[in-house]
Amino acid sequence: MSMNISILIPVRPLTEGKGRLSPVLTPHERQNLNRYFFTHTLDIISQAVSPARCFVVSSSPEILKLAKDRGMTPITEPKDGDLNRALEQAAQAARKSGANALLSISCDLPYLLSDDISALLAAAKKSHMVIAPDKNRTGTNALLLSPAGAIRYRYGENSYAHHMAAAKRAGLTALPLLRDGLAQDIDTPQDLSEWPCQNYL
């Protein structure tokens, strides 16, 4: 059976993300930064796959409108703000549209390149689960599951280890994918100071 992959992009409201940067950025600057990260992610993903295969889940009307304007499917996130539940909701919609493989990806990866997306899709031909950890190898920045729904999402603290353990319990092959574009995010003032692009303000 051929692989029909859909992309799931969970997004918090622009006013909520990157709270750890509060010591160096105003609320307005953080909002602009979050918007920059989100639109950058959409730009890169759209270079690799059709927007029609992308599902953006958020509680923010602004985010959902941006996604719809780009030809992506907007999905209103449950009000409880649970990331795993939001992803399950988006996954269900993607499966109904015919997806048999799902790639969930963070929306705050400023170094992300289209080659990183292509590498994820290529790796999916070799393994049931492809996982891209963050730079500390504790979190999960991208997770590709084939078949769709092979394991439940376990985002949160130590999600990398939890996803790997879940794949082992389910008897799935799991392939870690270590790439700078997928691992490098900006969470701290130090991360921000090392980022060469400062044109988001």
Image (cartoon, helix red, strand yellow):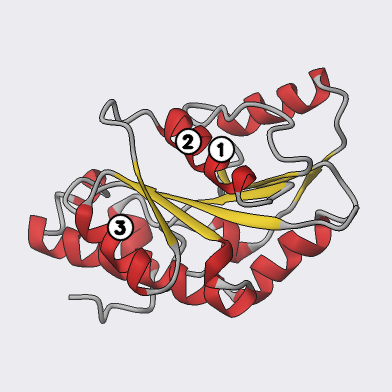
Residue 133 visible here = no
Residue 14 in the image, given as x and y percentages of width and height: 22, 55
Placement of the C terminus among the 4 image quadrants: bottom left
Label 3: element kind: helix
- 110 vs 197, left or right, is right
Tell which of 32 and 124 is nearer to you: 124
Label 2 to label 3: alpha-carbon separation: 15 Å
- 1 vs 14, left or right, is right
Residue 125 visible here = yes
Residue 69 in the image, given as x and y percentages of width and height: 33, 73
Residue 11 in the image, given as x and y percentages of width and height: 36, 50
Label 1: element kind: helix
Kindly identify the residue that appears in the image at 26 percent across and 81 percent down: 199
Q: Amino acid at mark 3?
A: Leu
Q: Which residue position is annotated with label 3?
A: 64
Q: Which mark is residue 142?
A: none
Q: Earlier in the sequence, mark 2 or mark 3?
A: 3
- 153 vs 24, left or right, is right
Quadrant of the image occupied by residue 192? bottom left
Quadrant of the image occupied by residue 83? top left
Check disc 1: other Cα within 10 Å, few if <14, some if 14-19, many if 20+. some
- 16 vs 176, left or right, is left
Is 129 placed above or below 120 here?
above
CB-based contact (under 8 Å), mark 2 and mark 1: yes
Label 3 to label 1: alpha-carbon separation: 18 Å
Label 2: element kind: helix
Q: Which residue position is annotated with label 1?
A: 92
Kindly identify the residue that appears in the image at 77 percent across and 28 percent down: 167
Q: Amino acid at mark 1?
A: Gln
Q: Which residue position is annotated with label 2?
A: 89
Q: Amino acid at mark 2?
A: Gln
